[in-house]
Structure formats: C-alpha cells, structure tokens
Image (spheres, rainbow, N blue to C red):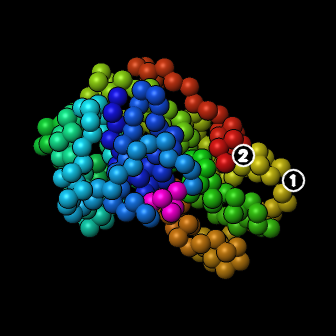
Amino acid sequence: MEVLLSGLNSYLGKRAMSNLARDDFNVHGIVRDLELFNARKTEESTATLDRVDLLRKGKEFDAFKIDSDLGLAIYITHVPSLGEYVNLNLELITLKNFIELTKLNGGGRLVYIARLMDKPFVPHIEALLKASNIVYTIVLKNLAIGKGSVLDKYMHQLINAKYLPYDNMFAKVKFNPISSLDLLRWIYNVDWDKHFINQTIEIGGPKTITVQEMYRLYKKTLYPNAEVKSILLPHFIMNMMFKKAYHIHKEDVVEFKRLMQQEYPIDNTSWKNIILFSFTPLDQVIKFDQ
C-alpha cells in the first residue's frame, strides 16, 4: 500500500520516516526543507522523501505524484500547539493543502495524529475534514517515548545530575506514555479501510504511571547505581534550579511541562475490542530504544 506522510519535523514524524515502512507499506514522506531535515535526522530513513511545501504550495506541490493510487495519508500535527490562534490557522492551511495533495494522488483515507493537549481544538480540525469530504480518523495520543523523545532527554539529564529538585504537583501527574515504535506498529496493524471511520479515538501506553514513577523506572533500568538525591522544593525555586544549577535547557523544560499539563490516563478498551495489539513494557522501551 502507498502511504503519504506529513509532519516529519515532529518527534513521531522523524521516527516514522525510519520505522514505519514495511514490504507492503511503501511510505512517501514530504517536507518543506529537505536539507534541514536530513541534517537533523538521527536514524536512516526507510521511506522515500520529497520536498513539498504545504504552506505555500508551488511547483514541487504541483509536480508531486505517486505512481500508484494512495491507500493512506497520515498527517502528524505540524505546529507546537493548536491552542494559539496563529498556529491553529497555519495548521488548518497546511492540512487543507495536504488533503488536496492526497486527493490529487488518488487518496481518500486520512489519519490525523495529534496530542492530548490539542483535544480542546480538535473540533476545528474535524470541521475541516468533514467539509473536505474525505474519510478520516483523528488520533489523540499520550506522550510518545523512545530514542530522542522529549521525555527521554529530560530523564537522562535529571539522572545525570547530583540532585533532583521536584514539586509534588508536577511529580504526581499521571499519564500513559506510549512507545513511539509501538504507535507506528499500531498504525501499520489497523485496517484503515474498515475501522474508525470518521471517528476520534485516543491511544495511550500499557501502564498508568506518574512522572515521579517514570523517573524511578529510568533510573532503575539505565542508571541503577546513580546517586541522585531528591529535594522537594516550591515550584518557582525548582524552576530556578533547573535553569541555573542543572543546565537543563529552558526550552526542554517548557516543552516537557507544556506536554505534561494536558496528559491524563487513557483507557484503550474502546479500540482494543476491535484490534488485537500488545504493547512493549515500559522498562523494555527504556532499555532497548536508546
């Protein structure tokens, strides 16, 4: 099956370019800046990559053609957050043009993948998809983890420090982190011609866990002998220590906290009644997807 993929500058998009393709799953990735994408990638691509600008369109957009009819189009959210007016409008423009490109290549089935934090703004996306007269599924996912993920980088930085400052509110956030490779395997295993037609579904990992428990799992799995002392601090002091004492980039802290603010445990039973799927245990994800 021919698969069109957009959103390659996201974490999941980068992993998909290297891990989604199969013998019967021929992936075509599109990106605006081909040189920049290749310079930043950390894994070898297993998919075909083309330069296409979904915002301004242009000659590459007009010339893009897949030899066989497109079986599935996958759009991974392009913008950091749909909650900002400018970002939402950019998303709607690029998604509209992606739908047009999908139809030009004989496609009629689209999967839109977003984060839980985008849930309040999904009605705008859904309205565009309905108006475009395309068969769609909106997938809202828990935080994706694995090699190079925001959470993975964050945990490594904390464990390699001497002290761990934390506040209770943040440490006790519950979520169901999902392996990025599991999510890609799940996408491959769904029969998109039959299931989740014009629906919004949520998917999370195998276990509900707190941020604090996730930290302990990383430490136990990768750094069992690390001597890190935990210090309970007021929130504003914790932020100062992250920036000044532990040299964790402000952007990493902001991005991780922004993602975690909207995370919550997901019940997968609604789609598990339709699809048989087994998740990789979290300790195995941490140990082997590095």
Residue 123 position within the rendered picture, expressed as x and y whole percent measured from the top left: 24, 47
Question: Dot 1: within a 10 Å radius of its alpha carbon, few (fewer than 14), some, or many (20 or more) residues?
Answer: few
Residue 97 covered by magenta stretch = no
Mark sitting on residue 49: none
Of the residues shown, which amino acid type is indicated by label 1? Asn
**Residue 5 visible in the current orientation:** yes
- Residue depicted at 36% across the width and 23% down the height: 191
- Dot 1 corresponds to which residue? 225
**Residue 186 visible in the current orientation:** no
- Residue depicted at 61% across the width and 43% down the height: 209
- Residue depicted at 57% across the width and 55% down the height: 42
Which corner quadrant of the image does residue 126 belong to? top left
Residue in the foreground of this view, choosing between 215 and 91: 91
- The majority secondary structure of the magenta stretch comes to helix
Q: Secondary structure at mark 2?
A: helix
Residue 55 position within the rendered picture, expressed as x and y whole percent measured from the top left: 24, 61
Residue 265 position within the rendered picture, expressed as x and y whole percent measured from the top left: 51, 41
Q: Which residues fall within the magenta stretch?
A: 37-41
- Residue depicted at 81% across the width and 63% down the height: 229
Residue in the foreground of this view, choosing between 72 and 36: 36
- Dot 2 corresponds to which residue? 217
Residue in the foreground of this view, choosing between 162 and 105: 105
Q: Is residue 159 above or below residue 181?
A: below
Residue 2 position within the rendered picture, expressed as x and y whole percent measured from the top left: 33, 33
Q: Earlier in the sequence, mark 2 or mark 1?
A: 2
